[in-house]
Amino acid sequence: MLRAQQRRRLMAGATATAALFTQSAVTIAEQSARSDENMRVGVTDISHRVYDLHMLSLWICVAIGVVVFGVMFYSIFAHRKSKGAVASHFHESTKLEIAWTVVPFIILLFMAIPATKVLTDIYNADDAALDVRITGYQWKWKYSYPKEGVEFFSSLRTPRDEINNLAPKGENYLLDVDEPLVIPAGQKVRFLVTAADVIHSWWMPDFSVKRDAIPGFVNETWAMVPEPGVYRGQCTELCGKDHGFMPIVVRVLPQDEFDSWIATRKEEAVKERELMAQTFSMEQSMERGKGVYEKACASCHQPNGEGIPGAFPALKGSALAMGPMEGHLDIVVHGKAGTAMAAFGAQLSEVDMAAVITYERNAWGNNVGDVLQPIDVANFKKGK
Amino acid sequence: MGADHHGPAKGLTRWLFTTNHKDIGSMYLWFSFAMFLLGGTFALVIRSELFQPGLQIVQPEFFNQMTTMHGLVMVFGAIMPAWVGLANWMIPMMIGAPDMALPRMNNWSFWILPFAFTMLACTLLMDGGAPNFGWTFYAPLSTTYAPPSVTYFIFAVHLMGMSSIMGSINIIATIMNLRAPGMTYMKMPMFVWTWFITAFLLIAVMPVLAGVVTMMLFDIHFGTSFFSAAGGGDPVLFQHVFWFFGHPEVYIMILPAFGVVSEVLPTFARKPLFGYSSMVYATASIAFLSFIVWAHHMYTVGMPIAGELFFMYATMLIAVPTGVKVFNWVTTMFRGSMTFETPMLFAIAFIILFTIGGLSGLMLSLAPLDFQYHDTYFVVAHFHYVLVQGALFAIYCGVYYWLPKWTGHMYDETLAKTHFWMTFIGVNTAFFPMHFVGLAGMPRRIPDYALQFADYNMLSTIGAFITGFSQLIFVVVVLKCIKGGKKATDQVWDGANGLEWTVASPAPYHTFSVPPQVR
């Protein structure tokens, strides 16, 4: 009783937070009814059919178990020596052997046929209204809308203090991101899934979509979500240290709201490009750079710049971060082959790149004193 | 020919230089038990961290090292060597052979292992830590992005592979050449049959494992790009090669278990095994199918639908021969005259719990369902049901069954039953709730989880600790049994049949110097 109440309260709370967060006028449907013990039904046609097939196979397994264990427990109770049971000596029956080869085979057909149908539909990603490109990075997701020219990163929003038990854990502990993927309701959306470093896997249980994100390959899958809402999932392929800390959140909006959202994002992208020509002061760069550092760099090099000995080098006091600008810029833009240091040239805008490098050179007592400008980054990229 | 030729040598050199199958069998069993405790310790670190949401005990880097080392040590260090140990002890005695066919190689097969696992364990102390990419070591996480210790891991795997290949060649040579007169193939005990088939699986797939780690080695050190897309390679190729080894590997761990259970049930039901020949054919079918189902571990990599369907149907077919085995076991018990000594308890628990693992395996075989199950705790629950409640329970079953033959004493039945029940409660408390959190959406290999999963994780951790500490009871039972106890008769169990029960208890250092005649 109490548990059910708690759960309902939790869900109400989650709904309220989600509504507040999205500031949307529509009522936000919380993710589908979820159970602590069973697969969730989900919100798409495919997920409903997967759930039904799951329950069908579960009940078939239960039925087999009841019959087999029933006979077994009957023998255990009736045919024990302490009850004076005398062993019979039969040990062969071709009829029985044939029966229990053929009957299971027929039962399998009852599972294989619906499974084949569902699988065929899952594999049909034709005629999508919208393409979204999903790229896995250690340890965040990049979502891009290739036709619309919009792209952004989505990473964990849960504060480090909650993970380290220094603050109470919030409603969506480990399942919250700074920028969710946004898609329109009632439209077939095709996901093109890939990765930039190691293999990740993009899983949205409510859509019954799980597809590996593999560097060098583009996998295709899709979802059509009938109702607006906020849906949560996680990376499901071990991808290194912070594998447990790269959640997935999808916000499904009605078509008109989605259209205005994407229009806003396009305008922002234009403004961002205009920032390129600006000259930034030390204060501006440091402020912006700190934010970028925390999102892009801190999980390896740590918020205090000290790294993790043996795994990730320190930036605080490092020869590279305090040496010539050229070398610093080169490693951040191009990465370092054979190590976990990714090429951030394609991940960060010129403005963010300039800010974060300035930050690394002047934070934690590094105090080199120089301010890198976005135009320098652009020239560096062109020159190489 | 002095007397010293017939007894064991004295001191340390007895163990270093021994070519006696019983000595080597004992060393394999003690070694695997030590590895079981080591791997169990890693498991308890994992479960302690997962006791509550949030990071308490270890950091994510170390957590990943623990999951990796736990898997590697349990698969290659605990379960596989335990089976080779039982094979060494029992196969010659069950087929009426004086020893293994290749005794010097037998010595070498064993003595490679302590070096392999010392090397693997040392990586925990290295800069950058131990391997942290999971026991399945998917590239490129295990190549480009791996800690430097990966090279030691690769050589350790090579050594384990050499040991396994030599061990299995030895078993095949022994079974094919040293059977007593009259012991035709279709008269061999089921444990011998299942090991015979397992040995062929090992010879077929261990070189594939050696191949895949060598390709990694070349990618890491010699500039090749087998698994690096940037160099024209293919990360999915890694998974195909790995699972071509990996799927037969799981049957390598479970087929001998089928053998042990098929020995123990008839003894305590006092009734012959039902459907002996269909058991043999079922085992062979399972072994064959194990080679054509590997990509069911890879449903989510984006294979073409034809591939998905092929691997789905092939995988579902495994349920048929496996079902035959379970039905035969139940029918063996039916209208028997059963008693429930510890080996029988482990055998019955094996059938129930392995069947649960098999049924969840059937659910996992359905590709569209696997999109929801894949890489969640549902999978973790599934393979622990088949490897712990399956393989490990069958190993305990076999050890308790043959322990009186080895030591010449009956073990303490009360303590042994306590060990059984504590373990039974422990493993089910640990692993059953994993089905729930997995279905509810908890991915595997994560050091921290959403609040929704908190209750069942706490329960799992409690179960893991009950399991872990219960194994100390087993140590006491074995040590007590070696030291003394009620004298065991030659037959030991009144329903036991087979050549191993015709020799004295404890089994003399050399048995069947003159081959027995099998009718």
Image: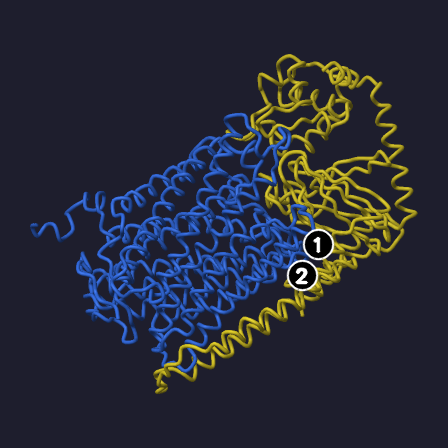
Chain colours: A yellow, B blue
**Mark 1, residue position:** A205
User: Image quarter for residue B504?
Assistant: bottom left
Residue under the point 35% across and 58% down: B472
Residue B394 as seen in the image, left or right of residue A276: left
**Mark 2, residue position:** A39
Residue under the point 55% across and 72% down: A65
Taking the view exactly as shown, the residue that stands out farthest to the left is: B2
Q: Do the residues bearing badges 1 and 2 touch, measured as CB atoms within 8 Å?
A: yes
Q: Amino acid at mark 2?
A: Met
Taking depth in this image into account, of A18 and A82 the one nearest to the observer is A82
Taking depth in this image into account, of A70 and A327 the one nearest to the observer is A70
Residue A284 as seen in the image, left or right of residue B171: right
Mark 1: which secondary structure? helix
Give me the C-alpha separation between circle 1 and circle 2. 8 Å
x and y, in percent, of residue A323 in the image? 62, 13
Quadrant for the C terminus of chain B, please: bottom left
Q: Amino acid at mark 1?
A: Pro
Does B465 sit above or below residue B228? below
